[in-house]
Amino acid sequence: MTDHTLTNHQLTDPALMDAMAPPTDLAGLHQLLEARAEQEGLLDVAYRTVDSPLGTLLLAATTTGLVRVAFEREGFDAVLESLATTLGPRVLRAPRRLDLAATQLDDYFAGSRTTFDLPLDRALSHGFRGQVHHYLPQIAYGHTASYQEVAAGVGNSGAVRAVGSACATNPLPIVVPCHRVLRSDGSLGGYLGGTAAKTALLTLEHAA
């Protein structure tokens, strides 16, 4: 069978799932493995890659929600190893869990979406960095704020450098918009995806 798209009904029927994936059909077997792992609670982190104007992105999610968006320059293997160490070793390419995130990112890059409506897993955001990550979505689409303004926004005006570190380690770039934070003189500052990616995101939002 060459069509590997299983319906929800099919995914809950083990006999039917077995029949749909002959032993020599590696793609079908992988899909069965994905579905079984999901159903039996054996999947700590599901991941997939998506194409974007910024290059290939890796998306990863736990059962709680989207937990990681990674740029190719970070090294996807290194990112997956880190997720396995931090969140659990059962990491599997399982695109279905990330269909909604992929669709919303497509809409964002097409200019038809200005906010994301996704369940997020904040397990990789801790302490002050976590406070900054929670604050960032308050910077509206098409607007920017300085590191100083963000520091003041989270109640610690002297923590400008710490805000910079928080933005640089944001596990959910694009969805949690650290690209909207600039230096006080208006220059870009650093970005996990590189300055070209940060410029492209700001240009996209300012053009809307």
Image: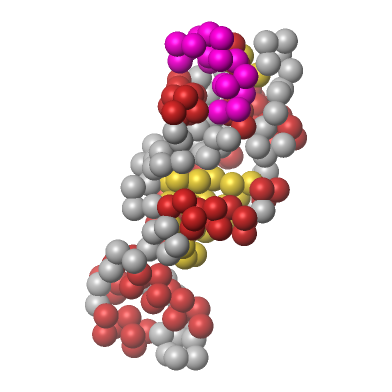
Between 11 and 151, the residue placed more toward the observer is: 151
* Residue located at (53% from left, 40% from top): 171
Q: What's the residue at 51%, 83% (across, down)?
A: 26
**Residue 63, percent across and down?**
34, 53
Main secondary-structure element of the magenta-colored stretch: helix
Q: Tell me where residue 130 sits by quadrant.
A: top left
> Which quadrant: the C terminus?
top right
Is residue 190 positioned above or below 184 on the image? below
Q: Position of residue 147 (x, y in %)?
A: 60, 16
> What residue span does the magenta drawing correspond to?
150-166
Residue 15 at x, y percent in the picture: 26, 85
Q: Is residue 31 left or right of residue 183?
A: left
Q: Is residue 152 magenta?
A: yes
Looking at the image, which is closer to me, 9 or 194?
A: 194
Quadrant of residue 200 within the rendered picture: top right
Q: Is residue 103 visible?
A: no
Scheme of image coloration:
secondary structure
Of the 4 image quadrants, the one containing the N terminus is bottom left
Q: Is residue 42 above or below residue 127?
A: below
Instruction: Name the side, left or right, on which 78 lies relative to 16.
Output: right
Residue 125 is situated, as x and y percent measured from the top left of the image, at: 46, 35
Count of residue discs: 0
Tell me, yes or no, if residue 5 can be seen here: yes
Left or right of residue 92: residue 79? right
Q: Which residue is the extreme one toward the bottom?
A: 23
Residue 201 sits above or below residue 88 on the image: above
Identified at 45% across, 15% down, the residue is: 154
Location of residue 206 by image quarter: top right
- What residue is shown at x 44% (from left), y 33% (from top)? 126
Residue 146 magenta: no
